[in-house]
Image (cartoon, helix red, strand yellow):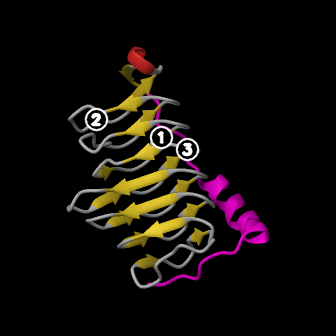
Amino acid sequence: MDSLTLSTAKIANGAIVCCECELQGDITIGSRTVIHPRAKIIALLGPIIIGENNIIEEQVQIINNGEDAMVIGNNNVFEVDCRVESKKIGDNNIVESKAFVGRQTSLSNGCVIGAKCEVLVHETLQEGSLFYGSGPDVKRRVQSDKPSAQGAQIEFLSKVLPNYHRIRKPLV
């Protein structure tokens, strides 16, 4: 199902955006960003600006329901079925499967939101913040290691996805 509004989505050269994803509103997608089928990126009021080298997996929901721009940096991974409404996401972050990041939470750099974690704090998370656990038992700490780079995975997906899915042409 094609649900991309061509007039408002800007796709950079080198980005892999499957036609089966849902893109609505004013969206900019950086180069070497991979968007899997069935991902939803919805800019209801304000625009969504996605940087370079990001991976957005199946059933991810990235939603901007505010008037300000939602800015997503570079080298981030959004794993299957997570939901992100944060206004600002820095670089090298991982939002794991079924996690939720609320609108008032901003991710700095190198943060990991663990599987099934719901993060609704009204702050910008410290670099290297790690949230883990689920339900009322969500805990946080600062990790000393940065999340690993996803260059090899992006390279692999850039070669494999076009063999099995229709890919959007770059529109800058």
Q: Give residue 18's quadrant in the image.
A: bottom right
Q: Amino acid at mark 2?
A: Leu
Q: Is residue 155 above or below residue 89?
A: below
Numbered disc 3: secondary structure: loop
Q: Earlier in the sequence, mark 2 or mark 3?
A: 3
Mark 3 — residue? 81
Mark 3 in CB contact with mark 1 (< 8 angstroms):
no
- How packed mark 1 is, by other alpha carbons closer than 10 Å (few <14, some 14-19, many 20 or more), is many
Q: Earlier in the sequence, mark 3 or mark 1?
A: 3
Q: Give coordinates of residue 10: x percent, y percent.
A: 43, 78
Quadrant showing the N terminus: bottom right
Q: Give coordinates of residue 88: x percent, y percent.
A: 29, 51
Q: Residue at x 60, y 78 (%)?
A: 168
Mark 2 — residue? 125
Compute the Cα span from label 2 to label 1: 13 Å
Compute the Cα span from label 2 to label 3: 22 Å
Relative depth, front residue between 100 and 74: 100
Q: Which residues are magenta?
A: 144-172
- How packed mark 2 is, by other alpha carbons closer than 10 Å (few <14, some 14-19, many 20 or more), is some
- Which mark is on residue 95? 1
Q: Amino acid at mark 3?
A: Asp
Relative depth, front residue between 150 and 95: 95
Q: Give coordinates of residue 11: x percent, y percent.
A: 48, 77
Q: Give coordinates of residue 68: x percent, y percent.
A: 20, 61
Compute the Cα span from label 3 to label 1: 10 Å
Quadrant showing the C terminus: bottom left
